[in-house]
Each structure stands twice: as C-alpha cells, then as structure tokens.
Image (tube, rainbow, N blue to C red):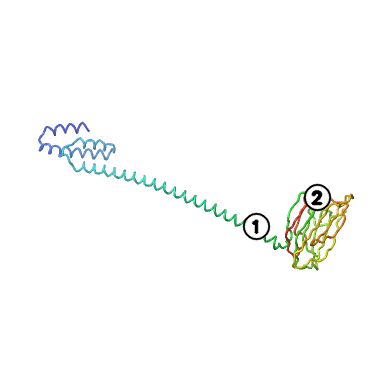
Amino acid sequence: MIIFVIFYAAIFAAQTDEDCVSVCKEDRIKHLDTSAQSLQTENGQLKLAIEGYKACNHGSCNNEERLKLLEFTEKQTEYAQQLQKENADLKIELSKTQTDFAQVCQKEKEDLKTELTKTQSELSSCRADMVLGRDKYGEALQKNKLALTLPKWYKTWSVKFDIRPFGSLGVVANVLHVTTGDNCCGVDSRIPGIWLDKLSSSLYVAVSANGALKGANFPPLALHEWSTVEVSQSKMSNSSGHYIIKVAINAKEHVMVINSDPQEFENVLVYNADPWHLAGAALTRNLEVHTNPN
C-alpha cells in the first residue's frame, strides 16, 4: 500500500496543480473507501492506512476521512494518557490510603496498649486496696473457704489470726480447720480446729495429741472487738522430747496439753472456715500459718 501511495505521489508531482487536485481527490476517495473496508475487517490495517496518509504531504490531500482518523487517533492517545494518569492517581491514592490505614491501626494498637496498661494498673491498685481493706477491716468468715494447702506439716507449728465476733448462731460454727481431708475423727482431722460456741463467743479448740483428739473451751471473746488468737505446738525445753500445745488469746497463754506423741502430716488443708459446719458470725484478718522441722 505504501508503494501504491508513493507511485501516485510521483504522478501528482508531474502534473499541474489543477490536475493534481482533480486526480488526487478522485484517487484519495477510492483509497479511503478501500482503507475503510480494510479497517472493518482487520484492525491491523489501521497502521498501514495512517502511514499511507502521511506519505501524501500535499496541501490538496486534506480529506475529511483522514482528519477523522487522525482525530480518532489523537482522542485514543489522549484517552490512554488520561487512563494512565488516573491509574497513577489511583496508585498514589491507594498508597496514601494504605499509609493512613497503617497509621490508624498503629494508633489504635498504641491506644489499646495504653488502655490495657491503665486497666492493669487500676486492677493492681484495686487489689492492693482490697488487701489493705481486708487487713484493716477483716473479712467475713465463709463456709468451705480453703485458705491454703501445705505439702508438709511438721511437729512444730502455729496458727494465728485476729477475730471480731458479732454473736452466736445457735450451733457450733467453724472459724479455722486444719486437716488432711476429713472433718473427724482421726488424729489428722483436727490438727487443730477452732469453733465458736453455739450460745456464746467462747472458743472451742480441738487438737491432735497423744494419738487422739483433745478439745477444750476457752473464755468468751469480746463482741464487736478485735481479739488475737494463736494456737501452737512447740518442743519443750527439757529433755523429755515432749511437745506442748498452747492457746493464747490476746497474748494470754493457756496450756492445753502436753503431747508425748507429736506427728507429722502431708498434704494438709487449711480452711477459714471448713465445709462441714456453718461459718462463725465473725470477721477475721491477718491469718498466719507456720510449720517447720525441729
């Protein structure tokens, strides 16, 4: 097609301007018809047609169809440039959005960490206040409250706590119970156990001594006031090898029994109060349990 156009261009150069206009116009119309049919059947001919139009560089070859094709090409080029620009803008916007999203996520993560730290701090403070409040004001006795478990209970031991009774319940009510698991009546069931009397604020203390259980009552405690109670077993200072069990109420000691057959126990439970009795009508605080080898 390019050779065809060049051939006609040579003829145009040999003729007069008037003849050139006439021949060029007629031949270009035929050429445009042929090119239009080619464009409809094969898209690839578009490039060849455009090259053919470029070869005709005379001013008299300014035909409408060629202009339309050139305008179409320019529009396509502009459209492609527009799409390319929009694509670039979208990439920039996407990058910006991803950056903004990452920053938002990072800020939310930092805010959550700050909130978590604040909450943990408040929780720790609340727990500390609860401990201080419990130590200052005491805690109501609760049935089946396991205070601690000890793997070994030695012959030397002591339990100590503050108690503030409010009255009696009409039944014996538990305050503290040290056992390997039973309520009664083996030597390992009340190592000791401490109860409030059913009709007064008197304490009843049971201990394991001399291969059996031994119990005793002690003077009433002052109602609505704090009293300190300690029950202990320690080795006597003489050479007998016996142990002495004492009960001290507000630092006033009472010898309960001399134990010639002290024993050691394993897996000991300390209840404050136990699961077998009602809990006493009292507050307790500052529970201390100690046991150690001789």
In the rendered view of the protein, which quadrant contains the N terminus? top left
Residue 123 locus on image (x, y percent):
61, 56
Instruction: Using the image as rendered, state which of residue 75 and residue 287 is in the foreground.
Output: 287
Mark 2 highlights which residue?
A: 154
Q: Residue at x 19, y 37 (%)?
A: 31
Q: Nearer the viewer, residue 187 or 113?
A: 113
| Residue pictured at 62% horizontal, 57% vertical | 125
Q: Is residue 294 above or below residue 193?
A: above
- Could you say which quadrant of the image residue 270 lies in? bottom right
Question: Residue at the right extreme?
Answer: 240
Q: Is residue 242 above or below residue 29?
A: below
Sort mark 1 into few (<14), some (14-19) or many (20+) by Cα contacts within 10 Å: few
Q: Callout 2: 10 Å neighbours few (<14), some, many (20+)?
A: some
Q: Looking at the picture, how far across and down is residue 214, in whole percent?
A: 86, 58
- Locate residue 25: give its quadrant: top left
Q: Which residue is mark 1?
A: 128
In the image, taking residue 223 as reference, residue 236 lies left or right, namely right
Give the residue displayed 87% in from the left and 57% down from the top: 257
Q: Is residue 77 left or right of residue 279?
A: left
Return the x and y of residue 71 as percentages of the image width and height.
24, 44
Label located before the other in sequence (2 or 1): 1
> Is disc 2 placed on a helix, strand or loop?
loop
Kind of residue at disc 2: Tyr
Residue type, mark 1 in image: Ala
- Give me the C-alpha separation between circle 2 and circle 1: 32 Å
185 sits to left or right of 47: right
Is residue 152 placed above or below 132 in the rendered structure?
above
Q: Is residue 175 left or right of residue 132?
A: right
